[in-house]
Each structure stands twice: as structure tokens, then as C-alpha cells.
Amino acid sequence: MKGKPVVSPVHLTATYKFYNSDDLIDVVQKRKGFIYSRWDNPSVVEIEKNIAELEGYDHALGFGSGMAAITTAVMANIKTGEKID
């Protein structure tokens, strides 16, 4: 694609419909698709790609809340038995 939207579309859906259980299982096992917007959705994927590109990285992570981002950052940087003061 030669052109790119200036503003990415926002996908306003909370859950995704599957017509059979095999399709749902395929998405769960292969992580190719969406189930529930709080976990992941096309809007978040697009913003992650844009931020990674802007910052010069291969990947970026988007979170559903600030607390989710803070918790992930803390948990990624502490080890078992360490204390946070």
C-alpha cells in the first residue's frame, strides 16, 4: 500500500463472534485474530505498530489501563524475593 491513513480507524467492538468452535480454538492457539477487546484489538495492534516505528523498535506494547502498564513494568524488572520500598 503506497498511501497510509493519517488517522487510524478505531474499532468499536468489545467481543468477537465465531461461527464455530474450531475457529475460536484456532484464534486462541495461534493468536491470529481477536476474541475480546480488553486483551487485544485491531486499534491496539495499529497503535503498537505506530509507536514501535516512531521509537525505532520492532515491537511496542499497548495496555488497557495505566495500572496494567505499571504492573507489567514492575513485574518485568523484579526478581523473586526482592522488595520494593
Image (tube, helix red, strand yellow):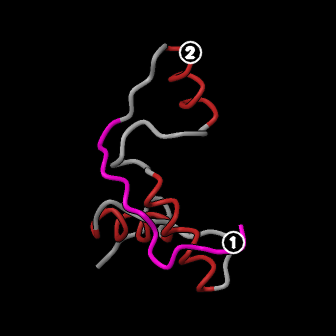
Give me the disc on residue 12.
Answer: none
Q: Is residue 33 left or right of residue 63?
A: right
* Quadrant position of the N terminus in the picture: bottom right
Q: Estimate the x, y position of residue 36 in percent, counting from the top left.
A: 37, 40
> 39 or 54, which lies in front?
54
Q: Estimate the x, y position of residue 6 in percent, counting from the top left.
A: 49, 79
- Magenta range: 1-15
- Label 1, label 2: how many angstroms apart (C-alpha)? 31 Å
Q: Is residue 33 left or right of residue 53?
A: left
Residue located 37% across and 61% down the image: 10
Q: Which residue is mark 2?
A: 22
The amino acid type, in three-letter code, at marker 1 is Asp
Would you say the magenta stretch is mainly helix, strand or loop?
loop
- Looking at the image, the residue that sits furthest to the bottom is 55
The amino acid type, in three-letter code, at marker 2 is Asp
Q: Which residue is mark 1?
A: 58
Q: Earlier in the sequence, mark 1 or mark 2?
A: 2
Residue located 49% across and 14% down the image: 21
Q: Estimate the x, y position of residue 65 in percent, counting from the top left.
A: 28, 64
Residue 29 in which image quadrant: top right
Q: Estimate the x, y position of residue 47 in percent, counting from the top left.
A: 48, 69
Residue 5 in magenta?
yes
Mark 2 Cα-neighbour bin, 10 Å: few <14, some 14–19, many ≥20: few
Callout 2 secondary element: helix
14 w.r.t. 84: above or below: above
Q: Are marks 1 and 2 in contact (CB under 8 Å)?
A: no
Callout 1 secondary element: loop
- Observer-side mark, 1 or 2, equals 2
* Quadrant position of the C terminus in the picture: bottom left
49 w.r.t. 41: above or below: below
Residue 13 in magenta?
yes
Residue located 59% across and 39% down the image: 31
